[in-house]
Image (spheres, rainbow, N blue to C red):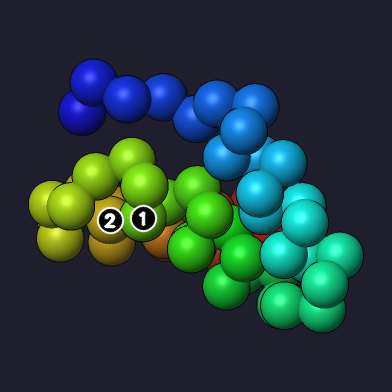
Amino acid sequence: MTETVSTRLLVNAAKMIHAGLPKRLSVHVAVVEPLTDELETVKALKDLCDLMI
């Protein structure tokens, strides 16, 4: 994985949360999905985010 979480991704997640989307879904859509398309990595990142939220 060569990408990292950028400020833009975090701001997008915050905008989604502010608009009323659940936090976990917002982070998954705005942060996890843009980083990789590898299913195993997506699952691991989603699990990590779920633990942190």
User: How many marks can you see?
Assistant: 2
Residue occupying image coordinates x 82% and y 78%: 20
Name the image quarter holding residue 18: bottom right
Mark identifier at residue 50 = none
Question: Residue 28 appears at what percent x and percent y?
Answer: 49, 62
Check disc 2: other Cα within 10 Å, few if <14, some if 14-19, many if 20+.
Answer: some
- What SS does tag 2 mark? helix
Residue occupying image coordinates x 77% and y 52%: 14
Q: Amino acid at mark 1?
A: Glu
In the image, residue 35 above or below residue 53: above
Res 42 seen here: yes
Question: Residue 17 appears at what percent x and percent y?
Answer: 78, 66
- What SS does tag 1 mark? helix
Residue occupying image coordinates x 72% and y 64%: 16
Q: Are marks 2 and 1 in contact (CB under 8 Å)?
A: yes
Q: Which residue is mark 1?
A: 33
Question: Residue 12 appears at what percent x and percent y?
Answer: 66, 49
Res 51 seen here: no
Q: Which residue is mark 2?
A: 42
